[in-house]
Amino acid sequence: MAEYGVAKLALPGEGESGDHYLVCCNQGSILAAAIDGIGHGAEAASAAKAATAALRNGIGEPIIRLVAACHEKLRSTRGVVLSLASIDVKHGLMTWLGVGNVHGVLVRANNKKGAAQETLMLRGGVVGDHLPQLQAAVLPVGQGDLLVFATDGIRPDFPAGLSALENPQRAADRILKGFGNGSDDALVLALRITGIQS
């Protein structure tokens, strides 16, 4: 139901990256997230791992409830910023939301369902510290659409030239190489949506 690629890089000098991702699929749903632990190094990684664990079993759950529960579990950590998408494959719908500065873009394989690219609206805040008023957006998705999440180690102009036809791993590698800013951990998750009944 999904084909995806990930490219990540720890800030030079750090033993591990504070940026993590999650992709879970079941029969009718896909849950995808890119998570950036606040700061970098071991404490950022620990917060990101806690968020990944809190979200992992939430496939099919309403994502506002999922993020609120994750917020409660992360109160003893540095906190994270994240973007999250829940895709209902049967109905061809995606619900997504972003807290902080993990950018998200959907590139359509077929423009008939809307604009060629949709950009995720981000809200300021930190999951585990101060959560904004959560608001999710719902949009139709089609077979072959490409969802890309990128943490703040990637320049926000990365969607330029993105194509839904590009192999997800190649897209992730290309974005990391071409748009990494070298000032923070960086992670790109590129996911092609498949299995949509059109």
Image: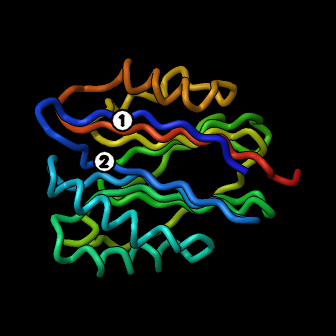
In screen coordinates, is 138 left or right of 196?
left
Where 193 falls versus 90 (above or below)? above
Say which residue label 1 marks. Answer: 8
Q: For residue 144, which numbered disc appears in the image?
A: none
Q: Which one is in front, 139 or 165?
A: 165
Q: Nearer the viewer, residue 105 or 58?
A: 58
Q: Residue furthest front?
A: 15
Relative to the observer, which residue lies in front, 87 or 25?
Answer: 25
Quadrant location of residue 75?
A: bottom left
Using the image, determine if residue 115 lies above or below residue 166.
below
- Mark 1: which amino acid? Lys
Say whether residue 165 is visible.
yes
Q: Give the side of residue 17 with respect to residue 87, left or right.
A: left
Residue 53, how many percent across, how many down? Answer: 39, 68
Which residue, given by chain and number where applicable, does mark 2 sit on?
19
Asked whether, in this view, residue 197 is left or right of residue 85, the answer is right
Q: Residue at x 56, y 76 (%)?
A: 62
Q: Looking at the rendering, which quadrant does residue 133 occupy?
A: bottom left
Residue nearer the viewer, 96 or 194: 194
> Residue 173: x and y, percent?
46, 25
**Image point (52%, 73%), residue name:** 57
Under circle 2, the secondary element is strand
Q: Is residue 60 above or below residue 171?
A: below
Pointers 2 and 1 in contact (CB under 8 A)?
yes
- Residue at 54 percent across and 20 percent down: it is 161
Which amino acid is tagged 2?
Answer: Asp
Q: Position of residue 123 (x, y in %)?
A: 34, 59
Left or right: residue 175 versus residue 147 is left
What separation in Å lies between label 2 and label 1 (alpha carbons)?
A: 8 Å
Q: Reading the chain from its start, which is encountered first: label 2 or label 1?
A: 1
Judge whether residue 115 can be spotted in this image.
no
Residue at (78, 44) in percent of width and height? 143
